[in-house]
Amino acid sequence: MEGLGVAQGVWLWVAVVGVALASVAIIAALTRTPPRYRRRLLVTVCFVAGLFYALEFFLPTREVVSENGMVTRQNFLTPFIPTLISPLAEVLAAFILGLGLFSLLRIHSGNVAKRKPGYYNSVALILSAVVMLVIGLWTNWTESPPDGIRATYGYLFNGLYQNMDAAMFSLIAFFILSAAYRAFRIRSIEGSILMASALIVLLGLSFGVIATQGLPATGMASNLRIETWSSWVLGVVSLPALRAIDFGVGLGALAMGLRIWLGIERGALFGD
Amino acid sequence: MDPTTDKRSNILWKLQNIDRRILYLLLLVVVAIPVLWPVTMPNAIDPMSESLWKTVDATPPDKIILLSSTWSKATRGENGGQTRALLEHMMSRRIRFALSSFTAPGAQVILDIVREMAPRFDYVYGRDWVHLGFQASANNFVKGINADFRKTVRQDFVEKRPLDAFAVMEGVRSIDDVHMVIEISAAATHMVWMQFIKPGVLVGFCPTSVMAPESLPYYSSRQLAGVLWGAKGAYDYEQLNVRNGTGTYGMGRQYMAPLSAAFALVILSITIGNVAMFLSRPGIGRGGTAS
């Protein structure tokens, strides 16, 4: 099956502008639709989208040999995944990103225009977003962007953004230490068990091995090594609890998924 | 004397209420010392790491490894070391590989690392490795490559050319031609592979320490072929590389001592707080009740 064609040159721009205009028209039409009908429309689209995956998963499959000799098991819906559904999902993801950017800029432009307290943070955000957007698109648009643009992209993405990201994340270590010191107080038997488990795992993952590295790695004595204790806590004590939580979460997700798919869920998703 | 003043002067009360700025300073010092003066920590290799190493090492010559990079520089201390150790092993064994990512920064960070390491092993883009790029729709990507790489990924990330243009993709049509998928991630993205990948395909997972426990049920059931547990996993893998002549020590060993020092401080501070609280209980020692 042929997939969606990739537009090139002028047609690419025609496609981009056309899709953008169509998107604006659809959003405008949806906004003007009475809530009762809008809800029905959203529920229907959601149901059809979910139905595709449900049918694709549950319908029986048969062996199909492609033109290059590849044998796969599929039903009549499977070929639509790489050719139609996957590109459609990517377009939707890109659209959502654009919508998020638009919403962000709208709110922060308002902050700047009204000189709200801390509006200079909004200025920084808008500037960062616009500069990164322009430089990023420029770098990826052409096969050989100008050296200055490539270098600027490198400074902004690798030099600035990535390192600020790392710096922000590393601050968590300080808060973890402070929080662990204040919160980890033994006030009950449960607290004692939790503390003992945490210490064993921490020691097993780090310097604790120093204390027991003289013990044999096999045989009865190996049971006294800290990493054996750590493995036991993780594999015997923690694992069943994790499985139980996973089952609970899975059942909850299934119930929520069914509610959304069938349009039963209200609130922010399908609220009037 | 004012009871409040008495309480404040009480050493036990002080030990239970150490100013956070002192803790921050202590952490900075204990982490900085082993960074400035590196110390080699002893290590016991985890069976999960060894299992991943053996699975990678058993890659047949006609198959590739798909390396999915879903992390950013925020977790480079853990994921960076894992990535480098894995790549060193794969490159020294001349294993061909494809890169992909479920996040935009993830696609870039692994590209930078491979570009830096490739000349050392004479790895040529297109011949030995290819980058499939950022995949916005994770589940559709996995479902798509189960059946066909070329229909799922129209062009590569670096040269923007169809996958047929690259020698590395010769004979690689679907996930059946991939020996294993390795997800290097700061989040629980192994679930995407667990849920959607074709049954029977080997999956390895390299999470940060905080996410690692979530992968244990899948390793225990052998749905995951191996797991690298944060920075310790990277150190394990480097040790296996050194032991088998497929690599050298790097970030894993470098970061193990600072990590251990930080853990030691956490344990020490918790112990001090608890001992002080215990001693300040009425009837045990002089002092007020625990806060």
Image: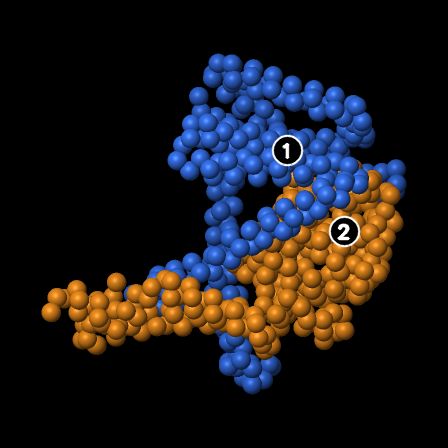
Residue A94's label in the rendered image is: 1
- Report the residue at 47% width, 52% height from top: A245
Quadrant including the N terminus of chain A: top right
Q: Chain of mark 2?
A: B
Q: Do tags 2 and 1 sit on the same chain?
A: no
Disc 2 target residue: B98
**Chain B shade:** orange
Q: Is residue A264 visible?
A: no
Question: Is A113 left or right of B8, judged from the image as shown?
Answer: right
B275 over A65 or under it: above or below:
below
B27 over A221 or under it: above or below:
above
- Report the residue at 47% width, 16% height from top: A36
Residue A231 % position (x, y): 53, 70
* Image chain in blue: A
Q: Secondary structure at mark 2?
A: strand
Residue B236 % position (x, y): 64, 70
Residue A59 % position (x, y): 68, 35
Q: What is the distance, in whole Å, between disc 2 and disc 1 at their CAs?
A: 24 Å
Question: Is B82 left or right of B11, judged from the image as shown?
Answer: right
Question: Is A79 left or right of B223, judged from the image as shown?
Answer: right
